[in-house]
Amino acid sequence: MANNKEEKLFTAFPPVTTEQWEEVITKDLKGADYQKKLVWRTAEGFNVRPYYRAEDLAAIRHLGSESGEFPYVRGTKRCNCWRIHQTIPVTCPQEANALALKLIEGGVESLGFSIADKEFSAADLETLLAGIGLDRYELVFCGCGARKVAELVIEKASAEKLDPEKVRVSFILDPIVNKLTLKGSFGCSEDGGKAFDAIAGLIRKSAPFKRMRFVGVNGQQFHNSGSTIVQELAFTLAVGHEYVVKLMEAGLSVDEAAPAIRFSMAVSSNYFMEIAKFRAARMLWANIMKPYNPTRGCASKMFVHAVTSKWNQTVYDAYVNMLRGTTEAMSATIAGVHSLEVTPFDAAYEQPTDFSERIARNVQLLLKNESHFDQVVDPAGGSYYIETLTQSIAEQAWALFKQVEEKGGYIAAFKEGFVQDAVEASAANKDKNVATRRISLLGTNQFPNFTEVAGEAVTEQTVVPGSPKCCCKHQEAAPSVRPLKPYRGAMAFEQMRLKVDRSGKEPKAFMLTAGSLAMARARAQFSCNFFACAGIRVIDNTFFHSVEEGAKAALESGAEIVVVCASDDDYATLAPRVKELIGDKAILVVAGAPACQAELEAQGIKNFISVRSNVLETLQNYLKELGI
């Protein structure tokens, strides 16, 4: 009976061919350019079509494998049991221990300890791990003291004769990214040789403990410096491969070197692209390792941690960061990462509070316990769209990875400036798109909170932090090559708005709405959002029945900027009349790009704002006129 119903259901909906779909689309476009209207050209260098069908999967070679099977595009294990990670700064081991125990009760499954003291001792380690142990939870050590802590942990694990299978500890030792890439120099040696030898020594010393990892590739720094998704992936893989090469040169085998790497990548709000990125990452790493003929399967399995984007976090309207963090967490967990850290919503301008850290943890707890994301392995598998994105990202990243290798590997490519040129070009393009609102940062360059004023915690230094200090004695050494500079996409807007907030002035923009009511209201709403991005107080008005009434109210308000909001047809007569009534008592702005703009400019009306405006530059110019 069930089969009969199914047959009737499918016969009721006969198949539709791609040609039929295209005919309908062409008809609906009414002569408009298909490529311009419906095909999206990504920053990653490939096109995305408006829809995909089963036939689009025919040429994709990675299909057919299961999770836990080479090339691991569907995951490196047969479950989606990612770990909830949170990092704790360690200045006082006792206080950090108390916080760690509290976090474990709150649902954290992977603890990160950022060690601030290079003189961290065995006694400090005992205090830090009291009630935690090395064999009960996944632990990650980073910071200035990470190398010394690695030695202490190996000694402790050996002395306590712990089960090697239960000791899951990682150490974020990454001289290639943390020193060369972010500081422009290895510091301790010209080529980083001492650092690689030291890491190789730790790997040998920890031989019984196969789940210890000593290299932490901080790939998220490419994203935080403004890279594309493809650049982040390709350069992260290149750094990982460089470590394998350097560690093998130091005498290790591929089976010792590759499993010692823990990759970390950012996850942005580009939802489907990020899902595809992590799937492509596992596949590419497996294929990079394959020619080395590893005897251990784990050498080909990418161990990847994700952290939500810092690039798109904002200082103003910071609660919106919760929404960004949630969608980013969804992408990462659907993609099957090993562990995930959600950045607290206030991390951009202050030490995160207990509340913000709890909210960050709860995002993942909700995804596990209410949305049950951990119950499905690779839910994106088989999706025409995501499988195609996975293939496209893999192809572009592989091509870029090969370019890096042709230059002699990541270190050589970075010293040549190849990596910096690529990332800086992407960052410049992103900055332009933020300035023109092609990239929306809700609450900052789009739909800002009109009444918000930055609190005391927000300063020029928090909005635009300086370069991080190196913990070694070479911290003042001049870089030998140009470093990358992590930043946030909202910083330029935030600098501008903070300047207004701290100026002691309260500039106002008055909406003079006249002519066609519908267009006046639409233009007023656009203009309010436009000027509020700079912290300019907007005075909105429903409608004025005459220009004279509107001009009188504008002058009485004391507003430094008067924005004429009307239809294009009305501007030819309304705008000159407003100019005549306002005179030089305020800056006159026309909302829109009317056909009569040249005629208005000839009459001395110079200021126009529209969807084509560079919002950042335009607002900066107005503030300069106002003496701010």
Image (cartoon, grey):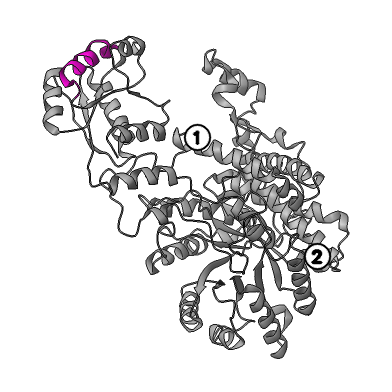
Residue found 46% across the figure and 73% down from its top = 106
State the extent of the magenta-drawn residues as a range.
569-584
**Which numbered disc, 1 or 2, marks the residue that appears first in the sequence?**
2
| Quadrant including the C terminus | top left
Residue 106 appearing in the image: yes
Q: Amino acid at mark 1?
A: Lys
The crowd level at tag 1 (other Cα within 10 Å; few <14, some 14-19, many 20+) is some
Determine whether label 1 and label 2 are within 8 Å by CB.
no
Q: Is residue 581 magenta?
A: yes
Q: Is residue 338 left or right of residue 465?
A: right
Taking the magenta stretch, the answer to whether it contains residue 457 is no
**Whether residue 247 is situated above or below residue 182 in the rendered picture:** below
Displayed quadrant of residue 428: top right
**Label 2's element?**
helix
Q: Residues within 10 Å of mark 2 (few under 14, many from 20)?
A: many
Asked if residue 280 shows in the view, the reply is no
Q: Amino acid under label 2? A: Leu
Report the quarter where the N terminus lies: top right
Q: Which residue is mark 2?
A: 247
The CA span between labels 1 and 2 is 41 Å
Give whichever of 373, 462 is nearer the camera. 462
Task: Tell me the chief SS of the magenta region.
Answer: helix
Give x and y (percent) for residue 123: 58, 89
**Left or right of 549, for residue 346:** right
User: Could you say where residue 54 lies in the image, as x and y percent from the top left?
Assistant: 69, 35
Instruction: Report whether 248 appears left or right of 265.
Output: right
Can you give x and y, in whole percent of width and height, for residue 147 in the image? 66, 74
In the rendered image, which residue does mark 1 sit on?
432
At x 47% / y 54%, what residue is drawn? Answer: 326
User: Where in the figure is residue 181, as x and y percent of width and height?
Assistant: 65, 54
